[in-house]
Image (spheres, grey):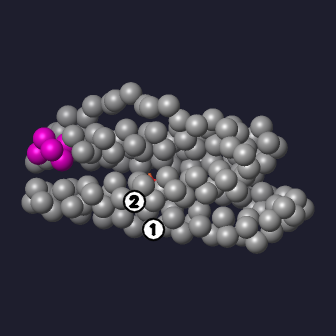
Amino acid sequence: MIGSKMSSALNAQINAETWSAFLYLSMSMAAAEMCWRGAAHWFRKQYEEEMQHAFKIIDYMEDQSAHVELRPIREFPTAWESLVRMFEEALEHEKRVTNMIHNLCELATAEHDHATAVFLHWFVSEQVEEEETITAIIERMRLVGDDYTALFFQDVELSERI
Ligand code: FEO
């Protein structure tokens, strides 16, 4: 049984995950316009993953007979000065999401909502993985700097994301 406070917080997280999805879709389109096809592919995959995160919470709430409420998605950016700036912003965003997940965990503990606390563990691990993946991409891009040939090969690697 999910209490009203927890239910409201999970609904806010559904909104945040959906906003994340649209942020990455927007990055995908911006990358495509810059002719970084690998990055465009990578961000589109990230869009799909964020929608899966939203659905994961929706399914959990439905299983618990909690009220799911979709809220309006706030505006998201549409342009970035460079590819590396895009990934830097993605990392900053993921760090904010990590904080949100940790706040949800603290609320679940305070509410003695053991089922939701266990459910959220998956998201805690997922955030570690997301931050690590994006950090590694940024580090490699910073290594090559303005070397467009090296960046081109990194972009090819990004196109291999399954
Ligand atoms: Fe759903 Fe990238 O956090």
| Residue 55 can be seen in this image | no
The residue positioned farthest toward the front in the image shown: 81
Instruction: Residue at 42% x, 55% y: name it.
Output: 96
Q: Is residue 9 above or below residue 87?
A: above
Q: Quadrant of the C terminus?
A: bottom right
Q: Mark 1 or 2 closer to N-term?
A: 2
Going 73% across and 65% down the picture, which residue do you hit? 141
Residue 23: where, in percent of width, then height?
55, 41
Q: Is residue 143 magenta?
A: no
Q: Position of residue 102 (x, y in %)?
A: 30, 61
In the image, taking residue 115 as reference, residue 100 lies left or right, namely: right
Q: Position of residue 138 (x, y in %)?
A: 66, 64
Residue 42 or residue 80, whichever sits in front:
80
Residue placed at 58% from the left, 44% from the top?
Answer: 24
Apparent side of residue 46 relative to residue 6 in the rendered image (left or right): right
Highlighted range, magenta: 3-7
Is the CB atom of the residue marked by disc 1 within 8 angstroms of ligand 1's nearest atom? Answer: no
Q: Which residue is mark 2?
A: 98
Q: Is residue 37 visible?
A: yes
Can you tell which of label 1 and label 2 is closer to the viewer?
2
Q: Amino acid at mark 2?
A: Thr
Residue under label 1: 128
Mainly helix, strand or loop, the magenta region?
A: helix
Within-10-Å neighbours for mark 2: few <14, some 14–19, many 20+: some
Q: Quadrant of residue 71?
A: top left
- Which structural element holds mark 2? helix
